[in-house]
Image (cartoon, helix red, strand yellow):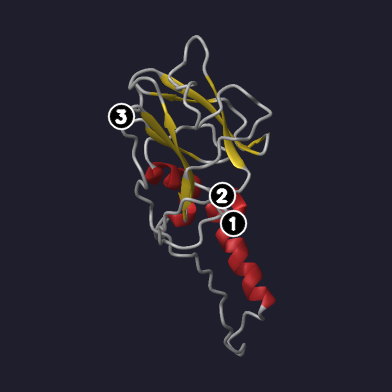
Amino acid sequence: LLALWVMPTIVAMSLTACGGDSKTTSTTDPVATLPTVSSPTEVVTAGDKQVVINVIDTSSISSSSSKSSKSTSSTHANWNLYLWNDTTCSALDSTDSSIDVGSWDKVDNMATGEDTYGPYWTLPVTSDSGCVNFILRNGTDKLISSDMKVDFSAFPDRTVTVVPGKSTVYDTRAAAFAAAFGVAQAKAHLVSG
């Protein structure tokens, strides 16, 4: 119903602004071009006694090519995971020296690598069942306001993806990408009334 009022109003204002008569010279309409970005595939998947946490960072996506690297770019240089075990969720291997478990002020859990879509972490776990608690941060600032959890019964492959600013854990990078970009990456459709 709103479209029935808005569209005629916009057309009328446009015609008024450019004269609206047949003597008006032709104008060039502005063209909006969105970058062509392919939906991502998984960079890595969890092996035995591992969990993989990917991030789809909408601000860093610049092309559809995926180039995996072991170092993080300056955009993600301070991004890290705060990790902890508790009585209901304790699958993180706190004895593994490659991760820090339970120290908020330490920012040692840096990304394992990254590609065009964002960084990812491969973390050691003690079991292929259970769950992992985490918070995505930039330094000690939360990038997602909620405490996050990878529940292995919900994600049996133990490979998940999150998007900064969203409190949902996604099963695949493609699902997180679709949620992050929504209508911006959708195809155009003609709507008639």
Residue beneath the point at 37% across and 47% down: 43
Q: Badge 1: how crowded within 10 Å, few (<14), some, or many (20+)?
A: few
Q: Nearer the viewer, residue 146 or 189?
A: 146
- Tag 1, which secondary structure? helix
Of all residues, the one furthest to the top in this rendering is: 87
Residue 88: x %, y % from top left:
47, 11
Give residue 53's position: percent from left, percent from top.
Answer: 45, 36
Q: Position of residue 68 (x, y in %)?
A: 42, 54
Asked whether residue 130 appears in the rendered view, the answer is yes
Find out whether the residues at labels 1 and 3 contact each other: C-beta distance under 8 Å: no
Q: Amino acid at mark 3?
A: Asp
Residue 73 location, quadrant:
bottom right
Reading the image, the residue beneath label 1 is 6
- In this figure, which residue is indicated by the disc labeled 3? 48
Query: What's the residue at 57%, 53% (across, down)?
Result: 59
In this orientation, which residue lies closer to the viewer: 44 or 171?
A: 44
CB under 8 Å between discs 2 and 3: no
Q: Is residue 124 above or below residue 77?
A: above
- In 3D space, how far apart are the residues under numbered discs 1 and 2 (Cα atoms)? 6 Å
Q: Which amino acid lies under the numbered mark 2 shown in the image of this protein?
A: Leu
Say the numbered circle drawn on residue 129.
none
Q: Is residue 43 left or right of residue 167?
A: left
Upstream in the sequence, badge 1 or badge 3? 1
Q: Can the viewer see residue 55 in this picture?
A: no
- Residue position marked by numbered label 2 in the rendering: 2
Image: 188 above or below 143: below
- Using the numbered discs, state the Cα–Cα distance from disc 2 to disc 3 in whole angstroms: 54 Å
For the residues carrying marks 1 and 3, which lies nearer the camera in this image? 3
Element type at marker 2?
helix
Instruction: Name the residue located 36 percent from the left edge and 43 percent from the top edge.
Output: 44
Name the amino acid type tagged 1: Val
